[in-house]
Amino acid sequence: MQVPVTILLFAGLAERAGTSQLSIEITEHASVQDLLEKLRAEYPALAELLPSCFVSVNQEYADPTTQIKSQDEIAILPPVSGGEETRFAIVHDVLQVEPLMKLVSHRNCGAILTFVGTVREMTQGQRTVSLSYEAYIPMAVQKLQQIETEIHERWKDIRIAIHHRIGELDIEEIAVVIAVSSPHRNDAFEAGRYAIERLKQIVPIWKKEIWEDGSEWKGHQLGPWNPTSELS
């Protein structure tokens, strides 16, 4: 049996959702964890923020196993202050380069490299009208973090941030921004190239090319897809 519940949102969560209040239906006696999973599925724009939030039920902080009743007052609470903006994100919003540069900048970096992937019009003689990106968001963010771990195993003192946009993108819009800082420029160049190639290889993001006369889902175009292999 499904029961309706109302959820209050605040700060960045409300901005992402475009509203301060959501109404959804959940299974009777569903837990807080069940509620969060449903929100991730139905509101992808909130998915990257939810792991850092707390849930209150009737104005008390709730455990993930807490059962929810239809008359409960439910609120999802983002961190109240402080904290660094997430360096790894899948977003619906328009991407900007400067915020990612700020995320990786520090007093000991001698170089900041940025890679900006944009939507091009012509591919192998075929005109693209727009692109549509889709992602398995929780796993995609986890794999972006894995790329950082792999980079730290190869290059010292690297700081990296990656944001990838999903949804409908027009020609020349930014699809991905990667920012890499390092004490030395050569490491920044090498780590940045590794990051974009690895992103194409292991991060579950799919691209649909929309043409004037049709459309097609495209792969990473790096040969046979094998996300379990290592990048040489």
Image (cartoon, helix red, strand yellow):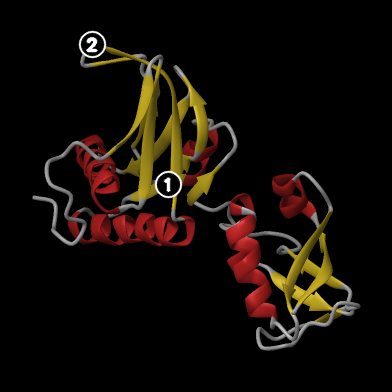
User: What number is the disc on residue 206?
Assistant: none
Mark 1 highlights which residue? Answer: 161
Q: Is residue 232 visible?
A: yes
**At 47% across and 37% down in the image, what residue appears?**
101
The answer to whether 37 is drawn above or below residue 157 in the figure is below
**At 33% across and 56% down in the image, what residue appears?**
148
Q: In the image, what residue type sits under mark 2?
A: Gly
Question: Is 173 left or right of 27, judged from the image as shown?
Answer: left
Report, in whole angstroms, how far the alpha carbon at label 2 lies from the one at label 1.
33 Å
**At 38% across and 22% down in the image, what residue appears?**
214
Viewer-closest of 72 and 149: 72
Where residue 181 sits, quadrant-wise, is top left
Residue farthest along the left direction in this orientation: 232
**Camera-nearest label, 2 or 1:** 2
Query: Residue 185 location, x and y as percent?
Result: 25, 35
Mark found first going from the N terminus, 2 or 1: 2
**At 69% across and 47% down in the image, what residue appears?**
16
The answer to whether 204 is drawn above or below residue 99 in the figure is below
Q: In the image, what residue type sits under mark 1?
A: Ala
Mark 2 highlights which residue? Answer: 125
Mark 1 secondary-structure assignment: strand
Query: Residue 232 location, x and y as percent?
Result: 8, 50
Question: Is 18 left or right of 116, judged from the image as shown?
Answer: right
Mark 2 secondary-structure assignment: loop
Query: Residue 30 location, x and y as percent?
Result: 70, 82
Q: Is residue 107 visible?
A: no
**Label 1 Cα crowd, 10 Å radius (few <14 / some 14-19 / many 20+):** many
